[in-house]
Image (cartoon, rainbow, N blue to C red):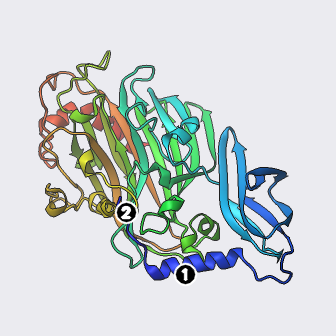
Amino acid sequence: MTARSLATTLAALGFLLFLAACQHSSTAPGAPSSFLVDSDPQGATIYLDGTSQNKITPDSLLDVPAGNHTIGLLLDTAGILYQFNAQTTIVPDSMPPIRWPLLLHCGDTTCLDPYIRRVTAAGMDFAVGANGTLFFEQGSGGGLYYPAGSSQSYMSVGAPVSAGFLGTNTPSVGPSPYDFYYYAGRPAPDTVRAGGVYQITQSSWLVPPPPYQQYLTGRGLKMDEQILTDEAYPGTVFLRIVFRNIMADTLYEMADPILYGTGGLTFENAYLGFAIDPDIGDATDDIVSYAPGDDLVFAYDSNFQESGFAADANAPALVGLEMLQAPAAATIVMTGWPSSWDWAGASNSEANALAFLSGTQPDTLTGAPNYPDPHIGYVPTAAADVRIAVTAGPINLAPGDSVVFRVALVIAPPVAGTFQSGTFMAPGDPLNASRPIMSVAGNLIQRAQQAASRP
């Protein structure tokens, strides 16, 4: 991985100010220090150098010897462990109060496994991750089964996505849906089931893990997600996402200290939305098409044949993302891309995120032409392992600013008699409403239109 350095002045300023916040000059050399430890939310167990102090926040640590120490906080909320650990230099005499955010910040799938919840609702069985990702088990299927109770897998991951410029710093930044270690869950998801509606409300931060924080990379967004199903709308997951720039929030700065004291950065010319990896059975034989009139991008098995499926082996369903609400001044973009064009956070490829999420990828970047309609990104002609996304932009988010998006994930069987299993079905020109795939996708489009009508 080739890393990209953040602007030198920003890095130096943030690091020095963070040290200044943690250290004070000595008035009694060699004397221990006492100070208040707090957390957001409160109630976390306090650890010092890996040993529980049998105290919960807010509380004071007394007579801590001067020198380098690790302070840890741990909160168990409904079986989900939120924590914060920091290397801190304790100086003699007094220290200011320390308040840290509690996060579920995982570096690998092993960490995430215990916090993935399975939801059976609206005819589906799907996964919700407490770190802010959706439809994720191990990244190779199992994120959504349709119909519920089957072993027919249609999804590998889903996540809110963002790409843009951090102020005047270049190039652009934007982690991929698979950069799950950037998604840090905040306490604690709230689940309600009543009257045929299943709803999960949760919050997460987009914050680079410590090894990547020195680089120009995605950061500083809070994402409040509402995930909802309604039995009156089968095969549909409704998502409401509020993106907020929190780069100037003092609590966020504790998790991303390179921004400490800078006043934050404006997220400029950004495209935000939601993306999924729709693996319809075998991941490598899928293809992407569009229903522009419904702000819908969808994926389907290119020859409608999945030997690994049971009842639907010769009629696998189609999966789509529909933009229901975006900022009024922004352009809605529907797009897709093959996995071979994926990018990664804190690498030179991260700049590709803005090209794809804005639907303007140049031939020189991918070798594939950008579709001329500004609402549509890439139109593939061959099957592949694909990703799809709905976004909107360009948007400027100054520190404290927020925008609201509503997206629907829809899944539905193909219309009988409109296709031949085992025969390749081309996506055609997205602006041709009479192309064959539109008839095949009739059930999906109908569900998308019903989703758009829900208040």
Q: Which mark is residue 163?
A: 2
Q: CA distance from mark 1 to mark 2?
A: 24 Å
- The answer to whether one can see residue 338 in this image is no
Tell me which residue sits at (34%, 46%) in the image.
Answer: 322
In this rendering, position of residue 106 left or right of residue 353: right
Front disc: 1 or 2: 1
Residue 222: horizontal and vertical position, in percent?
Answer: 53, 60
Q: Determine whether the residue tagged by mark 1 lies in a helix, strand or loop.
A: helix
Tell me which residue sits at (17%, 22%) in the image.
Answer: 421
- The answer to whether one can see residue 291 in this image is yes
In this rendering, position of residue 434 left or right of residue 351: left
In this rendering, position of residue 269 left or right of residue 65: left
Q: Nearest the camera: 71 or 114?
A: 71
Q: Amino acid at mark 2?
A: Ala
Q: Determine whether the residue tagged by mark 2 lies in a helix, strand or loop.
A: strand
Tell me which residue sits at (22%, 55%) in the image.
Answer: 377
Residue 439: horizontal and vertical position, in percent?
Answer: 18, 33
Q: Nearest the camera: 392 or 27?
A: 27
Q: Which residue is mark 1?
A: 13
Most extreme residue toward the front is: 30
Tell me which residue sits at (62%, 39%) in the image.
Answer: 191
Q: Amino acid at mark 1?
A: Leu
Residue 448: horizontal and vertical position, in percent?
Answer: 34, 40
Q: Nearest the camera: 182 or 370?
A: 182
